[in-house]
Image: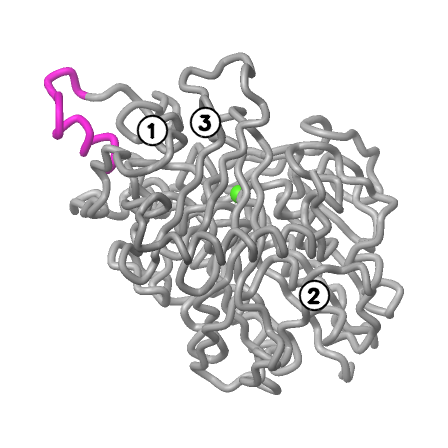
Amino acid sequence: MPERPNILFIMADDHAVNATSCYGSDINDTPNIDRIGDEGVRFENSFVTNSICAPSRATILTGKHSHLNGVKSFSDFDRDQQHVGKLLQEAGYKTAVIGKWHLQTKPSGFDYFKLLPGQGRYENPRFKEKGEEWQDGEEGGKEYEGYVTDLITDFSLDWIDRQADSSEPFFLMCHHKAPHRPWVPDEEHEDLYSKEEIHQPENFNDNYENRASAAAAAKMRIVEDLTERDLKGKPPPDLSGEELHNWKYQRYIKDYLRCVASIDDNVGRILDYLKERNLDDNTIVIYTSDQGFFLGEHGWFDKRFMYEESLQAPLIVRYPNEIAAGSVVDEISLNIDFAPTFLDFAGTDIPNDMQGHSLRPLLRGDTPEDWRDDFYYRYWLHLADHGVYAHYGLRTKRYKLIYYYAEALGTEGAIDEPKDPEWELFDLKKDPLEMNNVFDDPEYSEKVRELKEKLNRAKREAKDYE
Ligand code: CA
């Protein structure tokens, strides 16, 4: 039995806390994911530093913000740079990544990989396996019969099984494709929720008043922007108005939740397997998502915005040697913290240029005195998919300051370009749904001044000088 713990990092793609029952979801149940938290810890304030798929993955690997790891949008990951896979491999871990990769270039630092090309398919997906000829991007791979979430789990368990006789601990990144668009459920779950109506979030009919112009300009509305492919067909012709809107919401949310249900079942398979093989005590099991997702809040699907539903990701961790069952952490954790945390558990040095901090003290129930009480966020893809404006900002425990900096004015394809840079301030204690921008409210003028200073400081500390 190795002395250092195995690390099993299970990550979904676009799984929101509002569809996770241990975070209080009232629209679905995730009993297996919840089990990790019941026997371990749940982070209540886990956030990402750039809410989009490929950048989040690069951030998790490197422990650095997007502008330092080179993946601000969909640029190729520089495989020669330092990252946690390489460092754990050097420290004597067996390393593997299985499932969604989305970083284009061939992985370095992993003893084994079996990866979806690009976004990958839900049904009968192709996988590119280590040892076979590699093609960057969407190309290449061999087709496998079955459903993507089951297959990624099968391949992960197969790989763990092959480590059974190893004297070295393992590090496995098990990266699901689901529940990413276009939300295709498997046969086992396709009838789930078919006889019930799922209630809409209370701000489903948001009119985007009292916000900067970015919210109204974004093209991620359930009632307008879902395609027939997303909805798996045309709406019944006799529906209109609220009925039609609700029909679209039901189609969307049910397929999304069906994909989540399959992930939850497969998390259960992994937990059962670890227990059966007596690996459950010496394996740190992490469950998270590459970012959050809108599930009808503000009338939206998708992510990108610094608003809560997109900014927050579930984070639950089980490791009975160090984590008290059923514990909860309220401190702010970020996706830049994963790499330092893994290196800490591996007992190896955390490089100074990693920008995150090890979560290990928090996992044990100790909060370091100098733990962060705010953080810096930035989304760069101005007016790319879904027409979201580029922005950066600061979130504290209570407030959120967002700056839409409008530097790409004139980009083609923009319908509602911001005329000037715009600001938003939300008082999350009074306005948790972020419906009322108080940036220009005289009552908050002192707070605005203070938060702007903090934002400038946080941006400099993050070494973002642009
Ligand atoms: Ca994602």
Task: Kindly indicate the quadrant of the structure image that contains residue 167.
Answer: bottom right
Where does label 2 land, which residue?
Answer: 161
Where does label 1 land, which residue?
Answer: 216
Where does label 3 land, which residue?
Answer: 386
Disc 2 under 8 Å from ligand 1? The reply is no
Quarter holding the C terminus is top right
Earlier in the chain: of badge 2 and badge 1, it is 2
How far apart are labels 2 and 1 at the CA level?
50 Å
> Is 325 situated left or right of 217 in this image?
right
Residue at (50%, 37%) from the top-left corner? 122
Q: Is residue 334 above or below residue 178?
A: below
In the rendered structure, which segment of residues is drawn in magenta? 236-250
Residue placed furthest toward the top: 412
Q: How many marks?
A: 3
Secondary structure under tag 3 reads helix
Residue 123 visible in image: no
How far apart are labels 1 and 3 at the CA level?
11 Å
Residue type, numbered disc 1: Ala
Residue type, numbered disc 2: Asp
